[in-house]
Amino acid sequence: MGFLNKKFQLGGLQLPSNILCAPLAGCSDLPFRRMTSRYRPGLVFCEMVKMEPLVRKLAGTYRLLEYEKGMHPIGAQICGSKPELAGESAKIIEDLGFDSVDLNCGCPVDKVTKDGSGSGMLKTPQKIGEMISNMVAAVKIPVTVKIRAGWDTDQINAAEITQIAEQAGAVAICIHGRTREQGYAGPANWEWIKACKAVARNILVIGNGDLFTPSSVEKMFQTTGCDGVLISRGTMGQPWIVEDVYRHLEGLPPLERNPIQALLEHMDHVIQYQPEKKAVLDMRRISCWYLKNQPGASKTRESINRCDNLADVRTLILQYANP
């Protein structure tokens, strides 16, 4: 069909495809990436980290950046609003062995935007350019940027930022087809992504927003003309979605998946990585992803949300699988 590119060039880095897995705050931790990376996405990301604690070398921030050799190619995403920290932060990421570094200008949550970071950066497009320039000057790995379409519908400036990012040296820009004001409400407007592709000269345009099925990925390529896609919430509970997209775009039939088996496997990774108390909390969220569309699973989800130990969580999952 022509949309799948299995030799996708991100600057000097060749990726195995143009179907990428997004950084997801609070979700794309090491166990999550163990699940997704086996399906050979073009690129996986660690969770977003803030520049200040990265530069100050806080242990909690560095734990978010843990990865395994088999996860390459892997990207890191940094967030902040101080241009003077951008280059140093990018260099730390490069020295940690990451294959690319992304500047987050899209996170909509208040605690990130209150200091002008995340999608708060959309209000200062020239500063985005300054930060990208500082990052490009500091590292040899590809520098990319992720944005939303604008702060609100009165300030749609994604196309302008695309041009600024290209001039600053970013090799790719990912556009989420919603405004900061929307959060995740309402449908993503892919026309805003199409507008960015129309003004891009050399910078790659990556589409993002409402990619939950292989057919939605195909439709985004058709609608926007984008160079690649970044799948975000669509990876939750279906770590194999990238492989499903590959098969769909290559005209192959879908494979049958076993969400319950995958959930138990994901649980094993969480148990290896987290202390029990944290693992139980993680499993409340993760179980909801895998059980979301399973018949008659609502009571199991509710019961898991009341669990305070891992043995009970596993028992409930197994009871659901073998009633």
Image: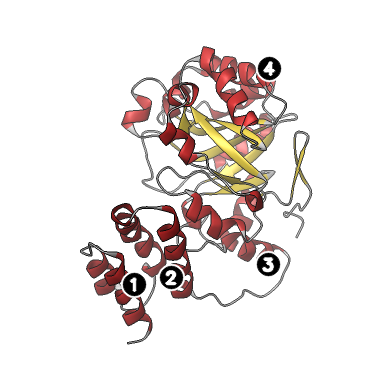
Whole-Å distance between the Cαs marked 3 and 2? Answer: 25 Å
Which residue type carries mark 3? Arg
Query: Within 10 angstroms of label 4, few (less than 14), some, or many (20 or more) residues?
Result: some
Callout 4–callout 1 Cβ contact below 8 Å: no
Whole-Å distance between the Cαs marked 4 and 1? Answer: 49 Å
Q: Residue furthest top?
A: 84
**Image location of residue 184, percent across then percent down:** 38, 45
Whole-Å distance between the Cαs marked 1 and 3? Answer: 32 Å
- What secondary structure is found at the residue carrying circle 3? helix
Which residue type carries mark 1? Arg
Which residue type carries mark 2? Leu
State the residue position of label 1. 314
Q: How many marks?
A: 4
State the residue position of label 3. 247
Please tell me whether mark 4 or mark 2 is closer to you in this view.
2
Which residue type carries mark 4? Ala
